[in-house]
Amino acid sequence: MARIVMKFGGTSVGDVDRIRNVARRVKAEVDAGNEVAVVVSAMSGETNRLVGFCDSMTNMYDAREYDAVVATGEQVTIGLLAIALQDIGVEARSWMGWQIPIHTDEAHGKARILSIDTTVLEQRLASGQVAVVAGFQGLGPNNRVTTLGRGGSDTSAVALAAALKADRCDIYTDVDGVYTTDPRIVPKARKLDRITYEEMLEQASLGAKVLQTRSVEMAMKHRVRVRVLSSFSDAPGTLVCDEDEIVEKELVSGIAYSRDEAKITLVKVSDRPGVAARIFGPLSDANINVDMIVQNVSEDGHSTDLTFTLPRSDLARALKVLEGARDDINYRELTTSSAVVKVSVIGVGMRSHAGVAQTMFRALSEKGINIHVISTSEIKVSVLIAEEYMELAVRALHSAYGLDAA
Ligand code: ASP
Ligand code: MG
């Protein structure tokens, strides 16, 4: 007997028939003798609809009331799934976040889970009852409903798996696993049998939307074995696990890309201590996340050019901040571009092998693609390139690292 947490996303519970299909999958695990807790999202499109109501009411709403509205989507699906389970003879009960409770901080709209009290759930599971738990929801310190940010049901599921010490957390979605890259761009992309937490974390934070980034952080911290699989097929999916569990490690396991990029260059800023702090301080105060940074060596010893990247959606705000601080920073000119994308190669194999970056640079140069900015981490090399070359670059890199399916 195992204890498992199963999570179903919005498309998997998109209508009544699909909820019946989910119930059958849950029943199969129960019939196999497992203790099962199920976490569900709202029906696909529902959370967007609810957010839309808030947006059309006013653009300055109280985040506590936003949470009161958007948390309702999951209440519907837990009730319906419990009914569907009971209808096929499976004992089941629905649970809202506050009923468990799942305690969070008070950051309404993007709350973090602090602790989960599993006392009652444990008793119910032991008695053979399936717990159907609302994803995305929590209970804040002031006794109000909170939500965990978009895509947050993944985090609910992993957190619950950690708290219940589940043997695994199966995340059912509309893709059948984690791929070497986006199959819409590279038809020869391959599904991975296994991927490490670290690689998955890079993929998630670089914009691959399979799992919410926080859920991967949580899985890595608590060593929860997560399986990503499709609720529409019986394919085995991808296991997100520890590096030791992967026997045949690939040098590079994935090529990721992000279109949400913009670039700012400050021309001729003075080259003296404290200048970087004066530039990036106000940006971080404005909650703007700067990603890649390059500063040239100054030729004249007095001034230098500084280029950095940020989310495209923050560009307008960043320009305001920098123009406001112009006298303090002291730059001659400011140029921007939002016609740029970031392409990254990811792989834990990089830690122990040289030449990974070189393969990337050669593959891009063979296609005549110019690199604007480069950044590296222990398991990732990223480049910023012109937007029109994105697909070409991703395909070229996928081949260059031998990732193409036969
Ligand atoms: N329903 C929420 C959303 O659409 C949470 C989730 O589905 O993970 O963001
Ligand atoms: Mg999701």
Image (spheres, grey):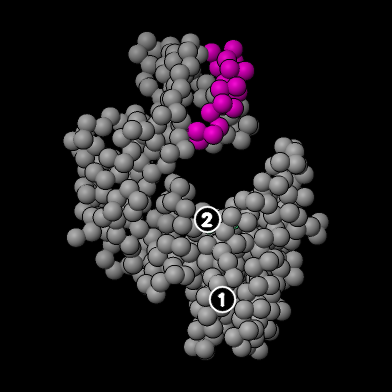
Q: Of marks 2 and 1, which one's residue comes earlier in the chain?
A: 1
Q: Are marks 2 and 1 in contact (CB under 8 Å)?
A: no
Q: Examine the rendering and report whether any part of residue 177 can be seen.
A: yes
Residue that badge 2 annotates? 212
How dense is the environment of label 1, judged by Cα within 10 Å: few (below 14), some, or many (20 and up)? many
Q: Amino acid at mark 1?
A: Arg
CB at disc 2 and ligand 2 closer than 8 Å: yes
Q: Is residue 80 above or below residue 305?
A: below
Q: In terms of image quadrants, where is residue 153?
A: bottom right
Q: Position of residue 256 (x, y in %)?
A: 37, 47
Name the front one of labels 2 and 1.
1
Queried whether the magenta region covers residue 142, the answer comes back as no
Residue that badge 1 annotates? 20
Query: Quick one: 292 or 144, which is closer to the camera?
Result: 144
Q: Position of residue 134 (x, y in %)?
A: 65, 67
Residue sticking out furthest to the right: 142
Label 2 sits on a secondary structure element that is loop
Q: Residue at x 63, y 56 (%)?
A: 46
The C terminus: image quadrant: bottom left
Q: Is residue 155 above or below residue 336?
A: below
Total marks drawn? 2
User: Is 300 displayed left or right of 64 in the figure?
Assistant: left
Q: In terms of image quadrants, where is residue 59?
A: top right
* Alpha carbon distance from label 2 to label 1: 25 Å
Q: Residue at x 47, y 13 (%)?
A: 333
Queried whether the magenta region covers residue 311, the answer comes back as yes
- Residue numbers of the magenta segment: 310-330
Q: Position of residue 227 (x, y in %)?
A: 44, 69
User: Is 165 displayed left or right of 102 in the figure?
Assistant: left
